[in-house]
Structure formats: structure tokens, C-alpha cells
Image (spheres, rainbow, N blue to C red):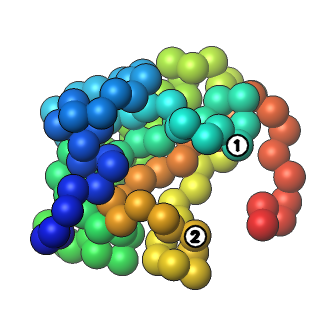
Amino acid sequence: MAGEKTIFKKIIDREIPAEIVYEDELCLAFKDVNPQAPIHVLVIPKQEVQSMAHLKIEDQELAGHLMLTVGKVAEMLGLENGYRTIINTGAEGGQTVHHLHLHLLGGRSMQWPPG
């Protein structure tokens, strides 16, 4: 991704603060500043990937790691009764930050359809 850093890249680079709940060599999880549920965490790759649509076959390990990390973070946060995971992709999908991120929401019963 060329151009100006996204807010998520600035968080990864520690240029702006975030309430980090988990970090490893491939990803970072932090509390959403505009939570939509009692627990709302974003899980992002440290590698800059614009969206799900931009993942390549060589990103397969990273994509799997992100999915497993969501489960690990959910367990850490005590979401044993369930949670919702959302990946917005592109403008019509509701993506506002062009850096792949997974929303982990929990702490209340989720409704369907979501929106």
C-alpha cells in the first residue's frame, strides 16, 4: 500500500496509542475506540494488506493465523458464550480503514440480520 499511513499502521508503529489486548509477531489486537458491543476488539495483521480482497495465496498462513488469533483473544476476554466476527471489505462492505481488520464483538446477544 503506497501513500499515507493508515491509522492502524500508526498503531502498529506506536505513533498513536491504542489499548492493546494481544500482540505476537504477526498481528495486533486492540480495543475499538467506537465500540458496538460491550467487548469490541480489532485484530489486524502487522503486514499491510488493504482488505480481504487483496489477500494472495502467499498470505494463506497469515490469514489462518488471524482466524486462530480471534479465537485466542475471545477466550482471553471470557467470551465462552459466543461472539461475532466481522470482516468488512470495500466501500459497500463498510470498510473505512484500508488495512485488513477483523472485528471481534461480544458481551451481549447478537441479532440477525446484522445490518
Can residue 5 be spotted in the picture? Answer: yes
The image shows residue 113, relative to residue 5, as above or below, that is below
- Residue drawn at x 61%, y 41% is 34
Report the residue marked by disc 2: 94
Quadrant of the rendering where the C terminus is positioned:
bottom right
User: How many residues crowd around disc 1 within 10 Å: few (fewer than 14), some, or many (20 or more)?
Assistant: few
Q: Is residue 8 left or right of residue 37?
A: left
Horizontal and vertical percent for residue 24?
23, 28
The tag on residue 4 is: none
What's the CA distance linking mark 1 and mark 2? 14 Å
- Residue drawn at x 48%, y 72% is 89
- Looking at the rendered structure, the kind of residue marked 2 is Gly
Mark 1 or mark 2: which comes first in sequence?
A: 1
Horizontal and vertical percent for residue 4?
20, 62
Horizontal and vertical percent for residue 48?
20, 58
Which corner quadrant of the image does residue 86 belong to?
A: bottom right
Residue at the far bottom in the pictured view: 92
- Residue drawn at x 58%, y 70% is 94
- Looking at the rendered structure, the kind of residue marked 1 is Gln
Report the residue marked by disc 1: 36
